[in-house]
Image: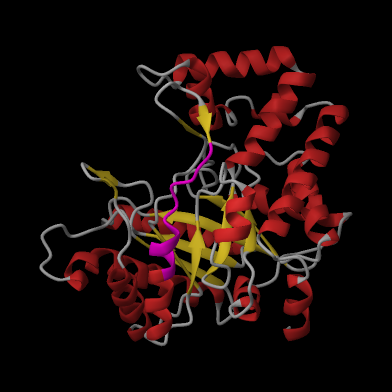
Amino acid sequence: MKPISGKKIFKALKDQNCIVLACNPRIIPGIAKGIFRAAKDMDAALLMELARTECNHHTGYTGLTPETFSRFLIEANDEVKHDIWALHADHIGIRKGDEADIADTKELIDHQIKAGYTSFAIDASHLFNFEGNTVEEELKPNIDVTIELGKFIQEKMEDKEFGLEVEVGEIGRTDTGGMILTKPEEAVVFIKKLNEAGLNPDVIAIANGSTHGNIYDDEGNLIEQVSIDIEQTKQVAKALRDNGFHVRIAQHGITGTPLELIKEKFPKGDIIKGNVATLFQNIVFDALKKYHPELHKEIFNWVIENKPIEGKKQEEIFGKNGKYAIKEFFNQIYAMSDECKKEIEETAYGETKKFIEAFNSHGSASIVRKII
């Protein structure tokens, strides 16, 4: 079944006490079908997404393009037939903001629209005016590019509804004092200027202490992610509500976050979208190690040799940079045995159900269904 508009999902659930699971199946076999099965069995609204670096029109590090990603997902859902899901273009990142960067980004978006994407995340958070005297002046480069690209999507979609996510505060950016967090005033000014330009995002991604991917301690041991600043997130959400904005928050970098922390502490309703990505990649690599050990060894060695991190243990290097091997070994990975694929599917199914439960989003698909 084809995806529906992301806006329909976000609008229907914006006042519900739940988070929509946004899954990144950067390796499709087994993973996508397992996710769709879990979402259908839990009657949960779902987003499927890849970022620009993973899936662009020239192929990112997953070896996928917008066209192949869309096609593979629809094929994976053919048998399952989960009806409440959106195809989301995550992190359409703009790093330079110059004419060439903008032109290339518009070309990517054009490919995504033609491929049937129904939701888009414009990420111009790298653009920041450090010389600005006010919050608006500091955010102006981000604001201007976000408006330009948002308007471009509106024009290309020809008045069709689409979900829109924007971003203020670069996730993972640090200074000598540690993580830099998005201030409530920054979120308010950002959304205010977008609204004034006729752009009405559904979701805003903020920097609140999360980190993408697997994380490790100083000794190279894989650890849980507990750095997300819940109180700061609540303050940003409250400031947006107090100013009359209907935009909700996207929580990025959830892989490694304890499920109990999500259940008990995540402000559902303030956060409407929860991204889970690296977890699914880990599932595939674990299964390959079990069923195709020689291939796994070859992938592991390629990562250590080609994507080293000075001073880090091999397991940490692979945990952080294994994703860059997906394109290099695309054909071998996608030719995995049916037995391997089935184990991946069942593991993805079980893990997806756990997150849907933690997000309190079981039954959310029925809510969307009633409204549309």
**Residue 184 at what x, y percent from top left?**
32, 70
Q: Where is residue 82 in the image (x, y as percent from the top left)?
A: 81, 62
Range of magenta residues: 224-234
Q: Which residue appears at 37% of the width and 77% of the height?
A: 239
Q: Is residue 229 in the magenta section?
A: yes
Identity of the residue drawn at 47% across and 14% down: 305
The answer to whether one can see residue 115 in this image is: no
Residue at 21 percent across and 41 percent down: it is: 176
Asked if residue 357 is positioned above or below residue 211 in the image, the reply reads below
Residue 49 drawn above or below residue 222: below
Residue nearest the viewer, comparing 140 with 353: 353
Q: Which of 298 and 262 is in front in this view?
A: 262
* Image spot of residue 206 (x, y percent): 40, 61
Residue 244 against residue 205 in the figure, above or below: below
Occupied quadrant, residue 117: bottom right
Q: Where is residue 47 in the image (x, y as percent from the top left)?
A: 65, 60
Q: Do we see residue 224 in this rendering?
A: yes
